[in-house]
Amino acid sequence: MKIRKIYLTGIVIISMLFNACEDPLQEQVFSFIAPENFYRTATDAEAALVGVYAGFRLIHMYDRQYMIGDMGSDDTFTGEFRGNQDRIQIDEFTVDPNNGIVRERYENAYITINRANALISRVPSIDMNPQQRDNIINQARFLRAFLYFDLVQLYGAVPLKVEETLNVNNVASPRVDVNRIYDEVIIPDLQAAENLPATQRLQGQVTNTSAKAMLARVYLTRAGNNPNSPFWALARDKALEVINSGQHRLLASYRDVFQLANQNSVEHIFSIQFSALQGVGSSFQEFFMPRGINSTTGNGNGVNEPTPDIVQAYEPNDIRFNTAFLLQLPLANGTVNNYAPRGNCQGIPSPCIPQPYIGKYLELTPPRGNLNYPIIRYSDVLLMFAEAANEAGGGPSAAAYTAINQVRNRAGLPDLTPGLSQSQFREAVRKERRVELAFEGIRRYDLVRWGTLLEVTRSHFQRFYPNLSGNVRDHHMLFPIPQREIDLNPGISLSDQNPGY
């Protein structure tokens, strides 16, 4: 716990230090400690790195990743609390350039990128241990790469900033081709991060396997749905490096992955760190619990609820179901609510509510949570390997079967049927990713890279919300560039907006 406290200390100080350059588009002047007066010691460099990590907890970043990665797919919807129009727009595919969630995600990504840029440019001049210096810089490069990777998946071509922004005089930045961003920043930065050590002194900091796993995801994304892409083999090989590293394994129980005692375990490769005890708790249980319920964990809002479709996606004997969904909730009055996610209360004690809610991040610690938010787990790497091996090899290899069967067996499911065709194995992997990684903010990203977002969501709406099926349009593969960016960035005009917006 002491290690974790060190890692989370100083976030308020860091946010003050970076206040003047957090929003390069906002024409305001703040009093602040000039960067040239800050980057002087190894302690300063470590503190600056904390500031980069802290950016991942800014509003509508990874405390609310579900709004970006799960809503607007077939997995979750904004449920009982529908007072926020920005969420409703994402949920119902009516997003416009003034959407606050889309804007804040974009702006806060660049705030954090600017923190990373400042560190990367200024830490080399500090007189400090060379290994410590390289470690800090390469962590910042990983985080910058991940943010740009997120931006290009969500918005397409975006401004490319690799130098520190200090004032409003250099904010004119045009949109840059996605491939250039991959080639000039995302892949080189992640390759540099492969030089990180296998373990870090502070929990939650990225390692060399974090970089390799993220590279595997980048290569999968670049492969898209092109059966002849060379990126399939690159993704397969990079995922295999993680597997062969010996640094990671599956925990024995799926439920254990989401227990506080097992945070930053051998299964967790990169997670966003949260700690209510340190004032940076997550809001998952507040947003995921039933609205109006006064439980021992606090009051819920019912903001993010599972769709009927994801409930039906689980095989009958899949033990992950009992972790993914809320089954019981102790109430503040000493009683217990029971839930039937599949809608059938037969055999379930009263009171029973025949409705699904997310139970994956439930803690009995009101109101903010301490559970980290997983970005990449080892099971994800196994499934990435299985997917890439199948595509690169023209069909599933024995190693691909072994990888996916490890994930299935832990869930209490039998091995996949041997002898599947390439297309059959592809569908099996896609189904497995959905249920294994449910509510971890990756569903929309998977659907986009497979090229199936429009087909899947249209079908989903037609089955469950037919009045919304006409909302899904071709341009929804990307979010709009925020209107505020267009208004304040001289390098982007209305004609540069993503088509359809």
Image (tube, rainbow, N blue to C red):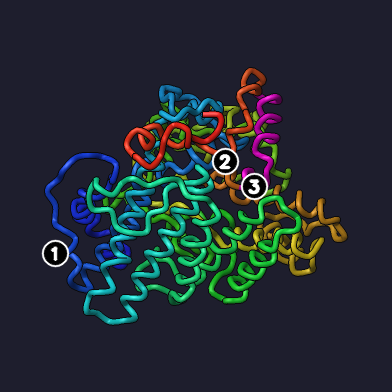
Crowdedness near tag 1: few (<14), some (14–19) or many (≥20) residues, C-alpha within 10 Å: few
Residue bearing mark 2: 325
Q: Is residue 294 visible?
A: yes
Label 3 sits on what residue type?
A: Val
Residue bearing mark 1: 37
Q: Position of residue 35 (x, y in %)?
A: 19, 60
Disc 2 on helix, strand or loop?
A: loop
The Cα–Cα distance between marks 2 and 3, rounded to whole angstroms, is 11 Å
* 173 inside magenta stretch: no
Q: Nearer the viewer, residue 178 or 423?
A: 178
Give the number of the mark in front: 3 or 1. 1
* 452 inside magenta stretch: yes
Q: Position of residue 139 (x, y in %)?
A: 39, 67
Q: Nearer the viewer, residue 130 or 268?
A: 130
Query: Is residue 410 left or right of 298 when viewed as pictured?
Result: right
Crowdedness near tag 2: few (<14), some (14–19) or many (≥20) residues, C-alpha within 10 Å: many
Residue located 57% across and 58% down the image: 218
Where are the magenta residues, as a range? Answer: 446-464
Label 1 sits on what residue type?
A: Asn
Query: Is residue 255 left or right of 166 when viewed as pictured?
Result: right
User: Going by the picture, which residue comes out furthest to the left?
Assistant: 31
Residue located 17% across and 64% down the image: 36
